[in-house]
Amino acid sequence: MSDVKIEIEGDSDAAVALALLRMIASAEGKNEDGDRGWFLETYAACLAVVRDADILDIDDEDDEELNEEEDEDEPAQA
């Protein structure tokens, strides 16, 4: 990975997520004139990571179905 220098202006979650987005975009060779959807989705994922949230992968419905099946197999807790 190339040396990427990113300065974070502020210490908010949004500022840190934006810095992370810039690092990822640089590594992926994306520029600001690129795919708007990619930038929005990637920024949302960066913000979720910064906020320590689970990232929802909307393209992976198989995992969701598998988790539902596992829940049905577990006995109910009292």
Image (cartoon, grey):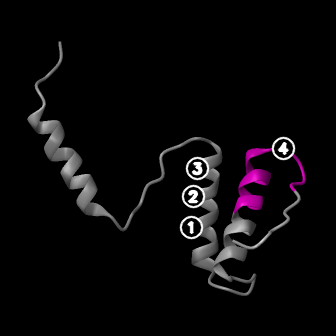
29, 13: nearer the viewer: 29
Residue 41 in the image: x percent, y percent? 56, 67
Query: First in sequence: mark 4 or mark 2?
Result: 4
**C-alpha separation, residue under disc 2 versus residue under disc 3:** 5 Å
Q: Provide the residue span drawn in magenta.
A: 8-20
Q: How many marks?
A: 4
Q: Is residue 38 left or right of residue 22?
A: left
Residue at figure coordinates x 72%, y 75% from the top left:
26
**C-alpha separation, residue under disc 2 versus residue under disc 1:** 6 Å
Query: First in sequence: mark 1 or mark 3?
Result: 1
Q: Nearer the viewer, mark 4 or mark 1?
A: 4
Q: Is residue 42 left or right of residue 3?
A: left
**Amino acid type, residue under disc 2 in the picture:** Ala
**C-alpha separation, residue under disc 4 versus residue under disc 1:** 22 Å
**Amino acid type, residue under disc 1 in the picture:** Glu
Query: First in sequence: mark 4 or mark 3?
Result: 4
**What residue would you read off at disc 1?**
41
Residue at figure coordinates x 75%, y 68% from the top left:
22
Secondary structure at badge 1 equals helix
Secondary structure at badge 3 equals helix
**What residue would you read off at disc 4?**
11
Q: Is residue 15 left or right of residue 63?
A: right
**What residue would you read off at disc 3?**
48
> How many other residues sit within 10 Å of disc 3, few (<14), some (14-19) or many (≥20)?
some
Secondary structure at badge 2 equals helix
**Which corner quadrant holds the C terminus?**
top left
**Mark 4–mark 3 CB contact (< 8 Å):** no
**Mark 2–mark 1 CB contact (< 8 Å):** yes
